[in-house]
Amino acid sequence: MGKNLIDLTLQVIMMGSLVGVLLLLVAPFINFGNKAPVSTPTQHVLEISDSLANTRQMLIGRIGKLLAQDNQDMKIEVVATGSGVNVLLRESHLAREIESLIARGVTFAACELALTSLSKSIRHGIDLVNGVKRVPDGHRYAESLKDDGYIDEMV
């Protein structure tokens, strides 16, 4: 009698486990009245502080990978500080590519402190790529974006 009760108990436990596993397998395919999946907006900030060729390539590559995710709600912002502002100059090797990325929704911001320093050293005005915005302090601006939930992308 005791052995039969133990066997019966084990069978009930095994059946319950089997039902649980089946529910886990089937649940993703059950429509619980939800509408279309909602894409989560993601916000990314990339900081560039020098204009070395390797850094420029990494920047463009990282932006390309983010854009390849094809998330309509994604925001990408590039903040240039220090000599990184050289990348955003109209005469930069990347000027056309920067304009193309701006047309695709990528935002570029140049640090006004760095631009002022550059302007003094080259002794003439600075022309930025069309669409690049100026921010008073690039480091503080990037930190404020991170505080607002932007993901810090390493360049």
Image: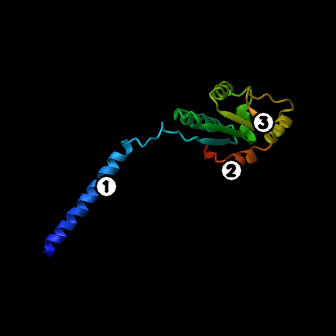
Identified at 26% across, 55% down, the residue is: 18
Identified at 73% across, 37% down, the residue is: 109
Tell me if 137 is positioned left or right of 96 in this view.
Answer: right
Q: Which residue is mark 3?
A: 134
Q: Nearer the viewer, mark 2 or mark 1?
A: 1
Q: How packed is label 2: few (under 14 Cα within 10 Å), some, or many (20 or more)?
A: few
Q: Earlier in the sequence, mark 2 or mark 3?
A: 3
Disc 2, disc 1: CB below 8 Å? Answer: no
Q: What colour scheme governs how the chains and residues are painted in the rendered image of this protein?
A: rainbow
Q: How many marks?
A: 3
Tell me the amino acid under the disc marked 3: Arg
Closest to the observer, 73 or 112: 73
Q: Position of residue 24 (x, y in %)?
A: 34, 51
Q: Nearer the viewer, mark 2 or mark 3?
A: 2
Q: Position of residue 153 (x, y in %)?
A: 60, 44
Tell me the amino acid under the disc marked 2: Asp
Q: Earlier in the sequence, mark 2 or mark 1?
A: 1
Q: Quadrant of residue 112?
A: top right
Closest to the observer, 24 or 143: 24
Q: Position of residue 93 (x, y in %)?
A: 67, 27
Disc 2, disc 3: CB below 8 Å? Answer: no
Q: Earlier in the sequence, mark 1 or mark 3?
A: 1
Residue 147 is labelled as 2
Tell me if 85 is positioned left or right of 43 in this view.
Answer: right
Instruction: State the quadrant of the C terminus.
Output: top right
Looking at the rendered structure, the secondary structure element under dot 3 is strand
Tell me if 78 is positioned left or right of 72 in this view.
Answer: right
Q: CA distance from mark 1 to mark 3?
A: 57 Å
Q: CA distance from mark 2 to mark 3?
A: 19 Å
Tell me the amino acid under the disc marked 1: Gly
Q: Which residue is mark 1?
A: 20
Q: How packed is label 3: few (under 14 Cα within 10 Å), some, or many (20 or more)?
A: some
